[in-house]
Amino acid sequence: MDTIQIKDKKFAVSITEQEILREVTRVANEINRDLAGKNPLFLSVLNGSFMFTADLMKRITIPCEISFVKLASYQGVSSTGVIKEVIGINEDLTDRTIVIVEDIVDTGLTMQRLLENIGTRNPKEIHIASLLVKPDKLKVALNIEYAAMNIPNDFIVGYGLDYDGFGRNYPDIYTVVE
Ligand code: IMP
């Protein structure tokens, strides 16, 4: 399928599954090399990163653990409006090497919030693995050590990412067509 329609928007394939898996394999190899002996705990951020997490973890060959977290958004009373609360961390993160596994870093505000939250739980170190990064939209300084791919500012779906809840199921990544 080269193009798909989701609600009012049309999308065209921009990154094929084959290209995605090539970069996911590269990132996995880097993590295997860098974090050997550290027994990392991977924290996968649902829902968007479920496909990336599965493909990444199949390629991680060092001893490790994996757990899943979710961000609950609600309208807060802060000046920024929407507050994202991290839910689902039941493990003791003290002195652990953590790898946050995200689908996409856009402005970086979500990742910043996660880093703050996880940072209060006394981990030894925190690393970031993101399938996609939109470098031109980053609003905060982040050290994204393991980025599979950089993409332009366009809205995308597929491979776990959604438009209004739909589109997560496609194995390729699609970009919105204006
Ligand atoms: P940030 O806080 O601006 O970095 O936004 C990160 C979150 O926004 C991601 O975890 C996604 O859920 C969502 N997001 C950002 N860009 C896209 C996109 O192009 N397609 C689908 N979701 C996106």
Image (tube, rainbow, N blue to C red):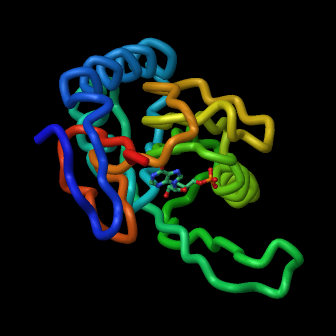
Residue 68 spot, x, y in % from top left: 40, 59
Number of labels in the image equals 0
Q: Residue at x 42, y 51 (%)?
A: 44
Q: Is residue 151 left or right of residue 112?
A: left
What x and y, as percent, mark residue 50? Answer: 31, 52
Name the quarter where the N terminus is drawn: top left
Q: Nearer the viewer, residue 2 or 169?
A: 2
Q: Which residue is located at x 59 percent, y 77 percent? A: 73
Quick one: 22 or 137, which is closer to the camera? Answer: 137
Taking depth in this image into account, of 105 and 66 the one nearest to the observer is 105
- Which residue is at the far front? 178
In this picture, is 36 found above or below 130?
A: above
| Coordinates of residue 22 in the picture (x, y in percent) | 27, 18
Give the side of residue 117 with respect to residue 55, left or right. Answer: right
Residue at image coords 39%, 70%: 164
Q: Does residue 8 appear left or right of residue 17 in this picture?
A: right
Q: Nearer the viewer, residue 100 or 132?
A: 132
Residue 116: which quarter of the image?
Answer: bottom right
43 over 24 or under it: above or below? below
Query: Which residue is at the far right?
Result: 79
Q: Quadrant of residue 47?
A: bottom left
Q: Name the residue rendered at 70%, 60% in the picture.
A: 117
Q: Position of residue 113 (x, y in %)?
A: 71, 58
